[in-house]
Amino acid sequence: MALGYAFGIQGYEAKVSDLTNIIVNRDTPTEHKDVDFSLFWGVWDTLDAAYFDSSKLDSAEMVYGAIKGMVASLGDPYTVFLTKRENEVTQEDLSGNFSGIGIQIGFRGTQLAVISPLPGSPAEQKGVQPGDYILGIKDESKDIETGTNGMSLPEAVQIIRGEPDSVVTLSLLREGIADPFLVDITRETIDVPSVVLEFVGKDESVAHVQILKFGAETAQEWDDAVLEIQKKENLSGIVLDVRNNPGGYLQAAVDLSAEFLQVGDVVVIEEYADGKQIEFTTDRLGKLVREKVVMLVNGGSASASEILSGALRDQRGFKLVGQTTFGKGTIQEPRQLPDGVGLHITVARWLTPKEAWVNEVGLEPDVVVEENQDTPEDDQLQEAIRLLSE
């Protein structure tokens, strides 16, 4: 199951398939006998008969458009129908290799927003910040200039992604700044690792572990980092850093949480519409269960990052340092459909082990430390190191 995902570019040549025939073939049996499709077919036939440019009447594209509209009518920005290319891009992003400006995007309410810029990315270098609202996107090379009202995540990234060295312009609105402003960003090839380890603090005795996403390769990179930590003879503690981590696979978050927990500890609870709950628990003793740990979070910590943070605070009492997290408390299940298209559907909400729901409120840190762009030091990291020395 995927909790968060990023997006890409390019279209594809659609064709009528088993999926489109569900609608195009009017004789297809359906269980929805009480649904009157006469208006739908009336509009279809009117377009077919009267639209002036018949070359635009592509049955597959019309069906896909209808499906997108049906899914969008739910008002859930994380439940989306994906074309073949959009579906492929979600996998590219989880693997960590793509061409773009290096931002993870989501929604605050119904408005498209930046969850986080990736470290060292073109977006970060241009000053894009977590929480920035994206009001418009412009790409002269694609002859596109559009607002984002009503735009889905895959549609937004189709425009934002592009060839290396090309430019995309974002119209952003930031809290504390009255007027929107424009940022021109040159795209690059982005290669994002899941885990970055460095030793910091006095005598380099603190392991600072940045988890940048929960993707396909996270487990192996995490295991490699754990081995290095275990080799450290003078280790005094671990700073687990999920700042600007937009999420990814639920199971990856569960697996990483288990490294610090006892067998049978609850990591996260899935709750469905009928009230049914499923607990995800650890099945092994963690390798780092005896280590002192402080966690770093901020407004770009979303989804699977919040699962990890909530689990370790609830179960082990680890302190969270930084700023309130993003607040994405729902679970999406990716389903593969004919011809390579897909559906990401919200199937449940998730709760922390103490049954807190973070959706749209986030996790409040135990120690609030604002990010200070005017100082060379990482104040949040320094506070975490100080707490480990207590």
Image: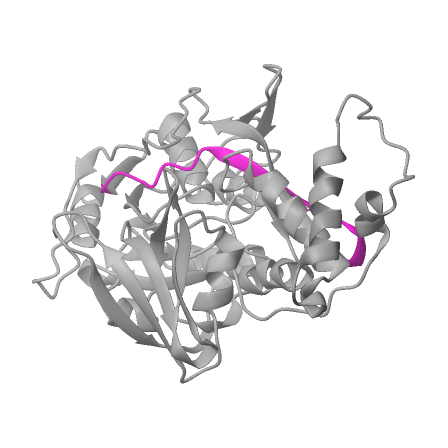
Residue 278 at least partly seen: yes
- Up the image or down, 119 lies above or below 344; here it is below
Left or right: residue 40 compared with residue 205: right
Q: Please provide the residue range marked out in magenta.
A: 322-340
Using the image as rendered, state which of residue 177 and residue 91 is in the foreground: 177
Going 8% across and 62% down the picture, which residue do you hit?
A: 375
- Up the image or down, 161 lies above or below 380; here it is below
Where in the figure is residue 74, as x and y percent of width and height?
Answer: 55, 33
Using the image as rendered, state which of residue 86 and residue 353 is in the foreground: 86
Using the image as rendered, state which of residue 74 and residue 87 is in the foreground: 74
Q: Quadrant of residue 127?
A: bottom left
> Quadrant of the image for the N terminus?
top right
Where in the figure is residue 203, as x and y percent of width and height?
Answer: 21, 62
> Quadrant of the image for the C terminus?
top left
Q: Quadrant of residue 84?
A: bottom right
- Up the image or down, 176 lies above or below 127; here it is above
Where in the figure is residue 318, as x and y percent of width and height?
Answer: 32, 34
Residue 341 at least partly seen: no
Where in the figure is residue 191, as x and y percent of width and height?
Answer: 47, 72
